[in-house]
Image (cartoon, coloured by chain):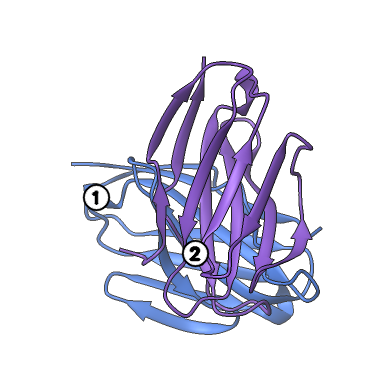
Chain colours: A blue, B purple
Amino acid sequence: GIQVEQSPPDLILQEGANSTLRCNFSDSVNNLQWFHQNPWGQLINLFYIPSGTKQNGRLSATTVATERYSLLYISSSQTTDSGVYFCAVVGGSTLGRLYFGRGTQLTVWP
Amino acid sequence: DSGVTQTPKHLITATGQRVTLRCSPRSGDLSVYWYQQSLDQGLQFLIHYYNGEERAKGNILERFSAQQFPDLHSELNLSSLELGDSALYFCASSVGTGGTEAFFGQGTRLTVV
């Protein structure tokens, strides 16, 4: 299967700081998604971004498919941004099955 | 709200028992996926159904089975439960099979005691 590596594994920030989370994957993909898992365990869709750049408020993401990586940018972080951020990909022949990275645990302090 | 509904939200049961987890996909979605999230294994794919047919299997134990019904809801059956089966079980749905965006339910937190 496809290997997905996320970095850093842990990130601690003060409110207002900016951060960049990285996702590297080992093969070409049909789909790449970023999720936020909140403290209640819910997986919330952030971006569906197999290639290109998207922005949604304070969050933006860029995927460079040819170089097999994606970046998630969080600006002006807030305490509600805390949680685990997952990157997940679908390979060319995996029928929609998502391969997940191990996640980045983000803690934002007031 | 993702539009994917999972029941129950929490389940506590004893070793050796059998439970059924239920998932209703988003309206119009034909694909249903089941994932297991445990502390040591992360998020693992279990099984995929598309329009009632099994399309792919992942790390699903023989004690586990699933099906998708004509109304497209899906059930995951877990039997002969062991302590190690305690985990968060997610259902996800998507329109097709080729990597369209997947949406996740709130999950069922299973505790085996």
Q: Which quadrant, please, contains the N terminus of chain B?
A: bottom left
Q: Quadrant of residue B78?
A: top right
Q: In percent of the image, x 45 and y 35: which residue is there? A: B109
Task: State whether residue B97 is above or below residue A18.
Answer: below
Q: Chain of mark 2?
A: A
Q: Residue at x 64, y 24 (%)?
A: B81
Q: Position of residue A64 (x, y in %)?
A: 63, 79
Q: Nearer the viewer, residue B109 or A87?
A: B109
User: Is there CB contact under 8 Å for labels 2 and 1?
Assistant: no
Please state the horizontal and vertical placement of residue A55, each as a whole percent of the image.
Answer: 37, 79
Q: How packed is label 2: few (under 14 Cα within 10 Å), some, or many (20 or more)? A: many
Q: Which residue is mark 1?
A: A80
What amino acid is labelled 1 in the image?
A: Thr
Secondary structure of the residue carrying tag 1 is helix
Q: Is residue B11 left or right of residue A24?
A: left
Q: Chain of mark 1?
A: A
Distance, label 2 to label 1, CA atoms, is 17 Å
